[in-house]
């Protein structure tokens, strides 16, 4: 089953306190942080993530590019992120695809839900992201501890022999 998360970029930035504060002085950096967080989200969950930004906040007309293996879309001039998300939901809608839309725009949530996609509020996404970041930190600590157990460099073959001895297999 293919799972896709469509993220209303500026809506999420405007909702997450740390990004909302940052966007006032440095919108580009707020966007970059959201993109990095969504790359972590995609890597951790295995869900395909697309971030949609309104073009009126950025010069240029309707761009699409990949960054961190994410699809990042800027709408065309006079096209809102909501309109693009609705089009994407209709394009992606298939029996073998679950589509989630992350936005706190209540009207958009209702339209998306009626189209057959699942909604995810900005708060839900932020809570999930915080949980993922904790999981990543735990995994890093676990990996460091695992590496620290063996001080002597040995080959994989020798490690396998020692592991058999440890288990009592000969």
Image: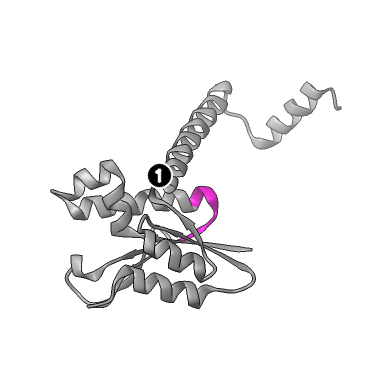
Q: Where is residue 84 shown, x and y percent of the image?
A: 36, 73
Which residue ends up furthest to the left in the rendered image?
25
Residue at 34% from the left image edge and 54% from the top image edge = 35
Whether residue 91 can be seen here: yes
Question: Considering only vertical position in the picture, is 110 above or below 87?
Answer: above
Where residue 39 sits: x, y (%)?
Answer: 41, 53
Q: Nearer the viewer, residue 168 or 123?
A: 123
Looking at the picture, does residue 169 appear above or below residue 27? above
Secondary structure of the residue carrying numbered label 1: helix
- Residue ID at (42%, 52%): 121
Going 53% across and 50% down the picture, which residue do you hit? 45
Residue tagged 1:
126
Q: Is residue 70 visible?
A: no
Q: Residues within 10 Å of mark 1 (few under 14, many from 20)?
A: some
Quadrant housing the N terminus: bottom right
Q: Which residues are magenta?
A: 43-50
Which x, y percent locates residue 88? 44, 73
Residue at position x 48%, y 40% in the image: 132
Vertical arrangement, residue 108 with respect to residue 37, above or below: below
* Scheme of image coloration: one colour
Quarter of the image for residue 142 reads: top right
- Tell me the quarter of the image containing the C terminus: top right
In this picture, residue 100 sits left or right of residue 154: left
Q: Tell me if residue 63 is in the magenta stretch.
A: no
In the figure, residue 65 lies in which quadrant? Answer: bottom left
From the top left corner, tell me how far across and down residue 37 is, in percent: 38, 48
Foreground residue among 91 and 141 = 91
Total marks placed: 1
Relative horizontal placement of residue 118, taking residue 157 as reference (left or right): left
Q: Is residue 89 above or below residue 159?
A: below
């Amino acid at each position: 089953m293919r799972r896709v998360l469509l993220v209303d970029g500026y809506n999420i930035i405007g909702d997450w306190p740390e990004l909302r504060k940052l966007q006032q002085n440095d919108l580009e950096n707020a966007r970059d942080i959201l993109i990095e967080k969504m790359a972590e989200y995609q890597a951790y969950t295995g869900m395909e993530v697309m971030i949609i930004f309104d073009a009126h906040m950025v010069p240029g007309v309707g761009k699409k590019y990949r960054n961190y293996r994410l699809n990042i879309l800027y709408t065309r001039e006079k096209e809102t992120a909501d309109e693009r998300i609705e089009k994407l939901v209709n394009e992606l809608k298939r029996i073998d695809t679950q589509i989630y839309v992350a936005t706190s725009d209540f009207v958009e949530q209702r339209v998306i839900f009626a189209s057959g996609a699942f909604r995810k509020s900005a708060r839900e996404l932020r809570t999930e992201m915080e949980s993922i970041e904790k999981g990543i930190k735990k995994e890093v600590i676990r990996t460091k501890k695992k590496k620290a157990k063996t001080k002597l460099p040995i080959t994989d073959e020798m490690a396998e022999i020692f592991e058999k001895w440890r288990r009592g297999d000969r």
